[in-house]
Image (cartoon, grey):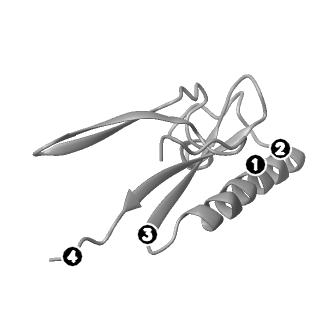
Amino acid sequence: MGDIKHRNIVTLHGCYTAPHYNLLIHELLPNGSLDALLHGRRSMTNNILDWPSSYKIALGAARGISYLHLLIIDSTCKVKTQVEEHETREGVHISMEFVLPH
């Protein structure tokens, strides 16, 4: 996952695994997730999305997912759209769950 480079995919810098938790270290997205923005887990006063912004986010997420679709086979992915502060670049944060043989 760390080798994947695309304008609409959040860069993964590293990971850490331990018996009780796993961590993914990715690039900083100061505005947090779109999910938090839409569902009130952040202050909505300065972060109301207009239709052009919503469209750009949806299109960017779709482009990131389309790119990943070409690379990832036989896996399950959970996609969370991320919003970045300084650019209107949309990233896709991917959590992979691979099915391992028993």
Label 1 sits on residue: 57
Mark 3 vs mark 1: in front: 3
Instruction: For marks 2 and 4, give the CA distance.
Output: 43 Å
Label 2 secondary element: helix
Tag 4: Cα neighbours inside 10 Å, few (<14), some, or many (≥20)?
A: few
Query: What residue lies at 51% left-to-right and 71% top-to-bottom?
Result: 73
Q: Quadrant of residue 21?
A: top left
The tag earlier along the polypeptide, 2 or 4, is 2
| Residue at 59 percent of width and 62 percent of height | 71
| Contact check, label 3 and label 1, Cβ < 8 Å | no
Residue drawn at 68 percent across, 44 percent down: 6
Q: 101 or 87, which lies in front?
A: 101
Q: Earlier in the sequence, mark 4 or mark 3?
A: 3
Residue 62 is situated, as x and y percent measured from the top left of the image, at 73, 60
Q: Which image quadrant for residue 15? A: top left
| Mark 2 residue crowding within 10 angstroms, few (<14) / some (14–19) / many (20+) | few
**N-term mark: 3 or 1:** 1
Q: Nearer the viewer, mark 1 or mark 2?
A: 1
Residue, disc 4: 101
Amino acid type indicated by mark 1: Ile
Q: Nearer the viewer, residue 54 or 41?
A: 54
Lower sequence index among marks 4 and 1: 1
